[in-house]
Amino acid sequence: MKFKYNYLHNTLAYQNEEYWNEITEDRQFQGHFGSQGFMLENGWISFTIYETKIRTFYKEVESPTWFTYYRKDLSRECPIIFTFTAQDEVEKINGKWRSKHA
C-alpha cells in the first residue's frame, strides 16, 4: 500500500488505484513517546517526528492471529509518499525492535 503523510498538518492518505483516500480525524490517536497515529482498516500506523527524520511504525493485521510490523525512517519532505517493503519488516527480540532481514 502506498501512503502520503503531511507532518505539518498531521494528515495521512493511502492510495486506492489512482485516488488518494484521506484518513479521517476521528481515526487518529496519540501514541507512545509523542507519536501521532492513525487507525487503518488492517492495522495502524504511527509517526514520530525527529529533528532530521520521521520514523514510521506500521502494524499490518492480515488475520486475527497473523500480523507484520514494519519500521521505516523517512526524510522530512512534506508531503512524503512512501511504501513498506519486506526490507522494512521488524520483530521484537529481547525487548528491542530489529530488522527481520539484517
Image (cartoon, helix red, strand yellow):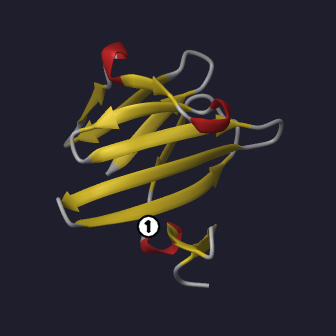
Residue beneath the point at 32% across and 25% down: 23
62 relative to 38 in the view: left or right? left
Residue annotated with mark 1: 85
Locate residue 16: give its quadrant: top left
Query: Horizontal and vertical percent for residue 95?
Result: 62, 68
Q: Compared with residue 65, is residue 30 higher up or lower down, i.e. above or below?
A: above
Looking at the image, which residue sits at the far right? Answer: 51
Query: Horizontal and vertical percent for residue 96?
Result: 65, 68
Count of numbered marks = 1
In this view, the residue in front, 100 or 85, is 100
33 relative to 43 in the view: left or right? right
Locate residue 49: give its quadrant: top right
Residue beneath the point at 36% across and 47% down: 2
Which element type, helix, strand or loop, lies under badge 1?
A: loop
Query: Horizontal and vertical percent for residue 84?
Result: 44, 59
Residue beneath the point at 55% across and 58% down: 71
Q: Compared with residue 54, is residue 72 higher up or lower down, i.e. above or below?
A: below
Looking at the image, which residue sits at the far front? Answer: 94
In this view, the residue in front, 47 or 97, is 97
Image quarter of the C terminus: bottom right
16 relative to 29 in the view: left or right? left
Looking at the image, which residue sits at the far bottom? Answer: 102
Estimate how packed mark 1 is, as few (under 14), some (14 to 19) or many (20 or more) residues with alpha carbons within 10 Å: few
Q: Compared with residue 13, is residue 101 higher up or lower down, i.e. above or below?
A: below
Disc 1 marks a residue whose amino acid type is: Thr
Residue beneath the point at 81% across and 41% down: 52
Locate residue 14: give its quadrant: top left
